Image (tube, grey):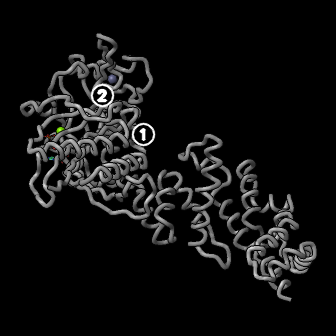
Amino acid sequence: MEYEVVIGMETHVELDTHSKMFCACSARFFGAEPNTNVCPVCLGMPGALPVINKRAVEFAMMVGLALNCRIARHTFWERKSYWYPDLPKGYQISQYQYPLAYDGWLDVDVRDLSTGNWSEESVRRRIRIRRAHLEEDTGKLIHVGDKSYVDYNRSGVPLLEIVTEPDIRSADEAYAYLSTLQQIVRYLGVSTGDMEKGAMRCEPNMSLRPKGSDAFGVKVEIKNLNSLRAVREAIAYEIRRQTALLERGEAVQQVTMGWDENRGVTVVQREKESAHDYRYFPEPDLPPLEVDEAWLEQVRRRVPELALARQDRYRRDYGLSAYDAVQLTGDRAVAEWFEQVVAAEPSEGSDRRALAKAAANWIQTEIFRLMKAGGIPLAEIASIKPTPRQLAELIGLVDRQVININTARQVFEEMFATGADARQIVEAKGLAQVSDVDALRQVVSDVIAAHPNQVQQYLSGQEKVFGFLVGQAMKATQGKGNAQLINRLLREALKS
Ligand code: ADP
Ligand code: MG
Ligand code: ZN
């Protein structure tokens, strides 16, 4: 029998606010000495009172809006009670009955990643978002030998939990969903989204069912996934494991599993306890959360155009390939930089599509290469030289055949190093392309005179020798010759 996998994703995103969810301690705890980043509130001391971090609420609203959710106008906080040493209060402040955001969706482009090669083809899938609610992170247990230690630096860091409907149908789709979500929180600037550092943690819930059925099978939840690659591998492994069970006529047990990165297998962490009783009840120390239209509108204005929308626009308006569009929108700063180049006036006889294509090429080749060599992260593209306007000018010089593309690369390196305008460099170094017909005609006839054998070969039908002769002429102009013109003059001269 053929089976279909059904996956629903639960994702926790740490919000990158200055302070914690309900106290003034820093939310940026990474690398700090254990238990130095704490106060009576996040240590759960009796009598300490929480205060809502407005910025965290706004960040959560931004994610909700980006995920096409409805934003609740009236919500309140609830205590989710359970006991664990990393939870000093004995409860977590969360939202249960009324999540801040709910009933949304996220469109993702799913590509076949099994070959390891880029695929221009993709399938667009819509994953429904059930809810996104705010809560606070727990502390961290550290196990050393037979001892366990607890670090409360993370206790109380704002956490957004995002839960999908069971709409994901493959490991590639799960990957597409998570990488798109990660990109969104980075575009919004609300989280680093770093899975390796635990700033984004995801738990796929998955089950199998006979293909064509619409009933749901028994689900398994997978934890401990700290990279996108681990997510794909764990899901692929679980599909094989559950398929084998079902094919043997055995039942899948409802359990929580952990991913063992080293062995590449899932292992049972705990059997399904009888449904947790978290004894949710309204948090008496915090006022309800009211979101009015004016506030929502103000937050809405802070949500930028997201990567997928930009990709569609670049492909439609500028005829870029899917690959180029994905590369240019990977980082919001790069996309904005690209758009500033394209906003410049295209040179005469050219158009915005050509300008966009040239900009896309420059960014993906020279700019990415030189930024990488200089150790500049892509997010800091705004700090490089040339400016977008200066690059547009360089593109214009190539368009108008003032310089050829090889010279342009040389000029670009100089612009990157010094910040000078392309025009200045071309003038100062005498790099302008030679388009003087008489001068080039002389060059061409010199080349013909100097290479009688090659000319003979060309005339007897060896077309590829033509390229050699063009190369000789270019060399004679120190690479500055107008290649198109040289081509034409050479053909003419050889004909006569
Ligand atoms: P739980 O109470 O066990 O956490 P929920 O109903 O809250 O379960 O769902 C948690 C996640 O699991 C959601 O993303 C949901 O879409 C997904 N899910 C629920 N049932 C199934 C199933 N049978 N197979 C796969 N995913 C499921
Ligand atoms: Mg769950
Ligand atoms: Zn604190």
Give neighbour class at mark 2: few <14, some 14-19, many 20+ (Cα, 10 Å): many
State the residue position of label 1: 192
Tell me whether circle 2 and circle 1 mark residues in contact (CB < 8 Å): no
Residue 82 point in image, percent of width and height = 15, 25
Question: Which amino acid type is shown beneath numbered disc 1?
Answer: Thr
Q: Looking at the image, which residue is at 45% across and 55% down? A: 117
Q: Looking at the image, which residue is at 17% across and 46% down? A: 207
Q: Is residue 295 visible to the viewer in this orientation of the structure?
A: no
Tell me which label, 2 or 1, sits earlier in the chain: 2
Quadrant assignment for the C terminus? bottom right
Residue 124 point in image, percent of width and height = 32, 62
Asked whether, in this view, residue 318 is left or right of residue 259, the answer is right
Residue toward you, 209 or 386: 209
State the residue position of label 2: 156
Q: Quadrant of ligand 1?
A: top left
- Image-quadrant location for residue 89: top left
Asked whether, in this view, residue 381 is left or right of residue 133, the answer is right
Q: Is residue 376 above or below residue 22?
A: below
